[in-house]
Image (tube, rainbow, N blue to C red):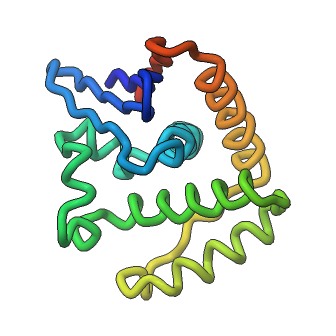
Amino acid sequence: MLVRFSKPKGTPVLTCVRADGSSTYSKSAHGAFFGPHDLMHFAVETTLGLRQAFFGLIAAGWTIEQFAEPGAAARLPAEAIFAEHVVNLLMQEATYGPARDAAEFNRVLSQVMAGENRSSGSTVRVVTEDELRLIRERFAQLLGEFQALKLGETLDREFP
């Protein structure tokens, strides 16, 4: 699936074009937040090999709008919930710091996941130190490339 991060005048646009040619896109109503957030999703999901999280679900036919529909969270697979928590923790880190080592990251992630009603009894995948390093590096590279775009330019990546 082609994942296109666009920088038009105004807010970033995320477009996903599936292998069958169908597509979904979103112009963020929340300004600059979703550009980096979506880039972090891409870094997390590609580094950890997640296929049932945000981009994997879009590749399988979900539209971006479906994620915001009432009751959507209840339909998400456990991997998507896990990915969202990883992304949120890493976005907090990228915004406010400091970077956590793997042991502390997984401790906090476990606490956050335990707070999910749906995750009771499920195990949280451990994120290794190397995976955290690769995610951070990939995100920094993607964010730098995105920020360097001129108005009207795009950053294209393939998922997976």
Where residue 80 sits in the image (x, y, percent)? 39, 59
Residue 49 appears in the picture as rendered: no
Residue 19 appears in which quarter of the rendering?
top left
Q: Is residue 8 above or below residue 68?
A: above
- Quadrant including the N terminus: top left
Residue that appears at 42% across and 80% down: 119
Residue 5 appears in the picture as rendered: yes
Q: Nearer the viewer, residue 30 or 111?
A: 30
Q: Nearer the viewer, residue 85 or 29?
A: 29
Q: Is residue 33 above or below residue 154?
A: below
Residue that appears at 16% across and 18% down: 21
Q: Is residue 149 above or below residue 100?
A: above
Where residue 131 sits in the image (x, y, percent)? 70, 46
Q: Is residue 90 left or right of residue 79?
A: right
Q: Nearer the viewer, residue 37 or 32?
A: 32
Residue 25 appears in which quarter of the rendering?
top left
Q: Is residue 1 left or right of residue 9?
A: left
Q: Is residue 73 left or right of residue 87?
A: left
Where residue 10 sits in the image (x, y, percent)? 43, 30
Residue that appears at 81% across and 62% down: 100
Q: Nearer the viewer, residue 32 or 51?
A: 32
Residue that appears at 50% across and 86% down: 115
Where residue 136 sits in the image (x, y, percent)? 72, 42
- Quadrant including the C terminus: top left
- Total marks in image: 0
